[in-house]
Image (cartoon, rainbow, N blue to C red):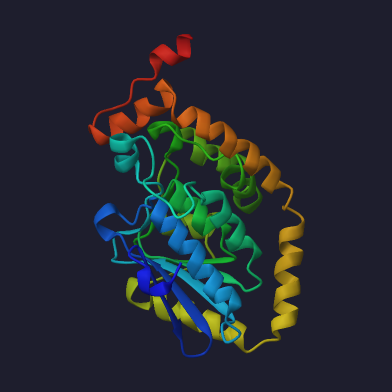
């Protein structure tokens, strides 16, 4: 996909060899649809192929949300996440490219990071949060789940008990707590967020690119088997999301009411 055709994502390369990928759907809390995912994948490919780029910053427009995950409102209205370049919803591929690109990816979390948006920042190599940022999962409330990297790798990052707490209770975690848990590397004032992320990227750019590449692959090697879990999980999610139980969560979200899952528990 050509950069000039992007509608949901911004892409630029800053002086010092840092690419900035910006999710640009602020009216939808930067939630992603199929096209957003396609554009994010393309943006990361541009950064991968550009020999001048040493690191990538992933952030979003505005100061309310980093990413609210999949666009549940669109899913409730249409039964899916909209048209895509290849006819498939490629969020698994996006997860893989964030891990596989041989350049560190720094999440600059400028607000709410929830659901699939929370998974995106967890998959980044480093995360910096604005002081007002919040973190959480929402899948069991809206008829979704991530039983791959979004849960198994999260447990590697913050520990089993806290990962289960995030997924089973769906509580929101503030930036200070996220830093204490090891969920983010640093918390800074909102006005310093992007500058800090760019400074980290430029620091990385001053180091040996081959050493950085091998280090990233080494860090990933121990958890790469989770890609198999992710494939299995997303195959199940595709079936579940179109079931009556899965759609109850999406419909309840769109109708601004609590979901009623009691009848599914009895079955």
Q: Is residue 8 visible?
A: yes
Name the residue rendered at 54%, 40% in the picture: 146
In this image, 207 relative to 194: left or right?
right
Q: Position of residue 18 (x, y in %)?
A: 51, 82
Q: Quadrant of residue 102?
A: bottom right
Name the residue rendered at 44%, 15% in the picture: 264
In this image, 215 relative to 178: left or right?
right
Q: Nearer the viewer, residue 156 or 15?
A: 15
Q: Nearer the viewer, residue 264 or 174?
A: 264
Figure check: 14 above or below 91: below
Q: Which residue occupies the extreme front position in the image?
A: 86
Q: Position of residue 226 (x, y in %)?
A: 69, 46
Figure check: 207 above or below 238: below
Name the residue rendered at 69%, 83% in the picture: 209
Q: Is residue 106 visible?
A: no
Q: Position of residue 29 (x, y in %)?
A: 30, 54
Q: Position of residue 141 (x, y in %)?
A: 39, 32
The total number of labels drawn is 0
Figure check: 174 above or below 105: above
Q: Quadrant of residue 112?
A: bottom left
Name the residue rendered at 45%, 75% in the picture: 20
């Amino acid at each position: 996909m050509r950069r000039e055709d992007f509608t949901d994502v911004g892409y630029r390369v800053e002086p010092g060899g840092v690419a900035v990928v910006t999710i640009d759907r602020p009216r939808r809390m930067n939630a992603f649809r199929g096209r957003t995912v396609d554009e994010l994948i393309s943006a990361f490919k541009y950064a991968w192929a550009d020999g001048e780029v040493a690191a990538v910053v992933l952030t979003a427009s505005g100061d309310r949300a980093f990413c609210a995950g999949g666009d549940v409102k669109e899913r409730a209205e249409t039964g899916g996440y909209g048209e895509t370049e290849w006819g498939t919803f490629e969020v698994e591929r996006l997860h893989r490219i964030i891990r596989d690109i041989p350049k560190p990816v720094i999440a600059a979390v400028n607000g709410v990071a929830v659901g699939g948006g929370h998974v995106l920042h967890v998959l980044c190599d480093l995360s910096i949060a604005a002081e007002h940022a919040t973190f959480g999962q929402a899948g069991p409330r809206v008829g979704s789940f991530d039983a791959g990297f979004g849960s198994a790798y999260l447990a590697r990052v913050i520990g089993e008990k806290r990962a289960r707490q995030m997924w089973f209770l769906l509580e929101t975690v503030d930036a200070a707590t996220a830093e204490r848990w090891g969920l983010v590397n640093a918390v800074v004032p909102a006005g310093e967020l992007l500058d800090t992320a760019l400074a980290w990227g430029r620091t990385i750019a001053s180091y040996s690119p081959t050493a950085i590449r091998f280090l990233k692959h080494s860090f990933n090697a121990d958890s790469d088997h989770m890609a198999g879990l992710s494939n299995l999980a997303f195959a199940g999610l595709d079936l579940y999301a179109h079931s009556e139980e899965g759609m109850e969560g999406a419909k309840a979200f769109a109708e601004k009411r609590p979901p009623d899952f009691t009848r599914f528990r009895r079955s």
